[in-house]
Amino acid sequence: MDLDIMSPNLLTFLSQWSQLAALWAIGTAILTILIHIIFAIAVYRDAVRLDQTRTLIIAGPMIWGIATLFGGVVTAAIYWAMHHSRLNPDIPIAPTETTETEEA
């Protein structure tokens, strides 16, 4: 009976496992880069549109786009919170009253 710890079967398994882990890491990195690029483009386009109607907070469209390219979803969420949520005093308060409908 062979009691060798590093048997050929174990070496083959570890080699395949490491290849799968490397492939997973590469795929995750590519997906993350794509998401960062997509969010950066979206934030840049929105910032250009908003810059025409009101003043952007902290930076201009190009800086927001570059920041989102490096910061990703977190930076895009900060941008949204500063420019599209109630944190921005330029956003009007929507009426919260509901209208009564006739009951049948």
Image: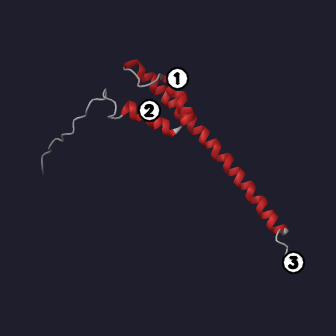
Of residue 10 and residue 35, the one placed in the foreground of this image is: 10
User: Looking at the picture, how far across and down is residue 56, in whole percent?
Assistant: 41, 23
* Amino acid type at mark 2: Tyr
Task: Pinpoint residue 42: horizontal percent, then vertical percent.
Answer: 50, 31
Judge by depth and name the residue closer to the eye, 1 or 37: 1
Q: Amino acid at mark 1?
A: Met
Quick one: label 3 or label 1, which is nearer the N terminus? 3
Residue for badge 1: 62
Separation of marks 2 and 1 at Cα, in angstroms: 13 Å
The residue identified by callout 3 is: 2
Q: Which circle's residue, 2 or 1, is located before the other in the chain?
A: 1
Relative vertical location of residue 26 with respect to residue 37 in this rendering, above or below:
below
Labelled pair 3, 2 in contact (Cβ < 8 Å): no
Q: Which residue is mark 2?
A: 79
Q: Around disc 2, counting alpha carbons within 10 Å, would you say few (fewer than 14), some (14 to 19), or many (20 or more)?
A: many
Query: In the picture provided, is 54 more to the left or to the right than 102?
Result: right
**Mark 3: secondary structure:** loop
